[in-house]
Image: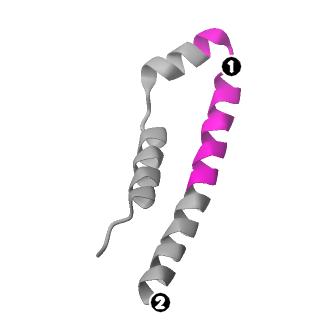
């Protein structure tokens, strides 16, 4: 299967966002913004997942053309 740099980058970013980065989460908790921080992480994951699906669809269509 042919790779696509954009797809690879999106998958890596999603993996990074889904990994619990305890020092960052601790800092958010210390500053009292843990719920806001988690909401932003969730929003970013959702946006990146949508972008990833779009890129995969485009990549499939480009290969088929």
Do tag 1 and tag 2 residues touch (Cβ < 8 Å)?
no
User: Which residue does the numbered mark 2 point to in the structure image?
Assistant: 65
Main SS of residues in magenta: helix
Residue that appears at 68% across and 19% down = 33
Q: Quadrant of the N terminus?
A: bottom left
Front residue of this view, candidates 30 and 52: 52
Label ID, residue 19: none
Specify which label sits upstream in the sequence, 1 or 2: 1
x, y percent for residue 5? 39, 58
Q: Residues within 10 Å of mark 2 (few under 14, many from 20)?
A: few
Residue that appears at 38% across and 64% down = 4
64 with respect to 40 (left or right): left
User: Which residue does the numbered mark 1 point to in the structure image?
Assistant: 33
Helix, strand or loop for disc 1: loop
Question: Which portion, as a residue range, is magenta?
Answer: 29-48
Using the rendered view, name the quadrant where residue 7 is placed. Answer: bottom left
Q: Residue furthest left?
A: 1
Q: Nearer the viewer, mark 1 or mark 2?
A: 2
Q: Residue furthest bottom?
A: 65
Residue that appears at 49% across and 40% down = 17
Helix, strand or loop for disc 2: loop
10 with respect to 44 (left or right): left
x, y percent for residue 30? 59, 10
Q: Taking 60 as reference, is 39 above or below it?
A: above
Residue that appears at 46% across and 74% down = 59
Q: Residues within 10 Å of mark 1 (few under 14, many from 20)?
A: few
x, y percent for residue 55? 52, 66
Q: Taking 26 as reference, is 7 above or below it?
A: below
Q: Residue furthest top?
A: 30
Q: Taking 2 as reference, is 64 above or below it?
A: below
């Amino acid at each position: 299967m042919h790779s696509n740099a954009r797809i690879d980058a999106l998958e890596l970013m999603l993996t990074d966002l889904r990994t619990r980065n305890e020092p960052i989460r601790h800092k958010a908790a210390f500053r009292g913004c843990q719920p806001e921080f988690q909401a932003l992480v969730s929003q970013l994951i959702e946006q990146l997942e949508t972008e990833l699906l779009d890129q995969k669809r485009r990549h499939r269509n480009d290969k088929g053309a």
